[in-house]
Amino acid sequence: MKKLHLFFIIFFVGFTIQGQTSPFFKKSDTLDIKRRNAVIITETALSVGTLIALDQLWFSDHPRSGFHFKDDNNQWKQMDKIGHMMTSYYVGRTGMNVLNWAGVSKKNQLIYGATFGFTFLTAVEVLDGFSKKWGASWGDILANASGTGLLIGQEILWEEQRITLKYSFSQTNYAKQRPSVLGENYIQQALKDYNGQTYWLSANIWSFNKGGNFPKWLNVAFGYGAEGMLYGTTPNNLVSQNPYRQFYLSLDVDLTKIKTKSKFLKTLFSTINFIKIPAPTLEYNSKGKFDFHFLHF
């Protein structure tokens, strides 16, 4: 599931951004029935196919049970919940974009597109609920709803996304202690090692002060991370493990607001805009300590 979250963010963001370089993806000014139907069929096929694949390739390897819930809200310092939130946000955002491409009304984009992330991830949660090992999680469902709520709320308030969810990662020594769980190489660790991950709310300053003197690309970002985690919850025999939370204040860049005539750079900037740009960062952690990072990623 850790891998699935980031995979969907990259896949859906990349798919959407292709529209900036391909005439085929040029937005329709009016409702295009053929495009709308193509979107519905494609999303349905991808969703059903992915759920079937998950059920057969992942859940079938573990004992089944009757549908049940499992309280996992105290695990991994809730880093996994924020992963759910971010995935729901970006999949929903892409759902809106492809319906916008088809000329669907803004109201229906919000109803049927923005909720796509929540709907899909909740379906995955149902599969979890029939697994004896896991079980459905109310915390995951709430996180999915939060990501969708962030997306829809901004569209209703401002008709734009002034605050976006972003991700950053740096390697830690914890993965070496449990490589089977936290990853054996850089790619695996970027997906699985919560100790090295940071999730950000990145707000574009100019969007809140249009006409002001701030650069249009400048953001201020608020981050959350955690370290010291070898297990979801600390076993009683590992008294030396002392996981703690980290809170960050930093600057960031909205790459989509950088002016360029290059279609390639526009596509590149939009595709990687979910990644937080390294910048000077102030950290406060749950140990009660402040720390300053000249460049934090």
Image (cartoon, rainbow, N blue to C red):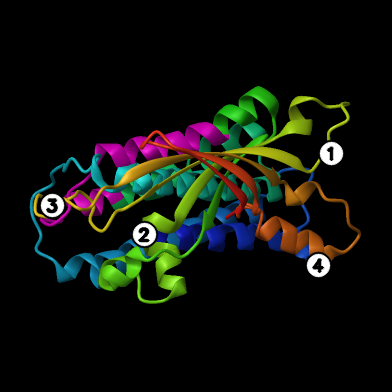
At label 3, which amino acid type do we have? Pro
Please state the extent of the stretch shown in magenta in the rendering: 125-151
Q: Position of residue 80 (x, y in %)?
A: 35, 49
Of pointers 3 and 4, the one earlier in the residue sequence: 3
Q: Helix, strand or loop at disc 4? A: helix
Of pointers 3 and 2, the one earlier in the residue sequence: 2
At label 4, which amino acid type do we have? Phe
Of pointers 4 and 2, the one earlier in the residue sequence: 2
Question: Which of these two is toward me, 278 or 97?
Answer: 278
Magenta span has 292?
no
Residue 158, by quadrant, is top right
Q: CA distance from mark 3 to mark 4?
A: 49 Å
Q: CA distance from mark 2 to mark 1?
A: 35 Å
Query: In the rendered image, which residue does mark 2 sit on?
Result: 2
Query: In the rendered image, which residue does mark 4 sit on?
Result: 264
Q: Helix, strand or loop at disc 1? A: loop
Query: In the rendered image, which residue does mark 1 sit on?
Result: 215
Q: Position of residue 11 (x, y in %)?
A: 54, 63
Q: In this rendering, which labeled residue sits more in front, label 2 or label 1?
A: 1
Of pointers 4 and 1, the one earlier in the residue sequence: 1
At label 1, which amino acid type do we have? Pro
Q: CA distance from mark 4 to mark 2?
A: 30 Å
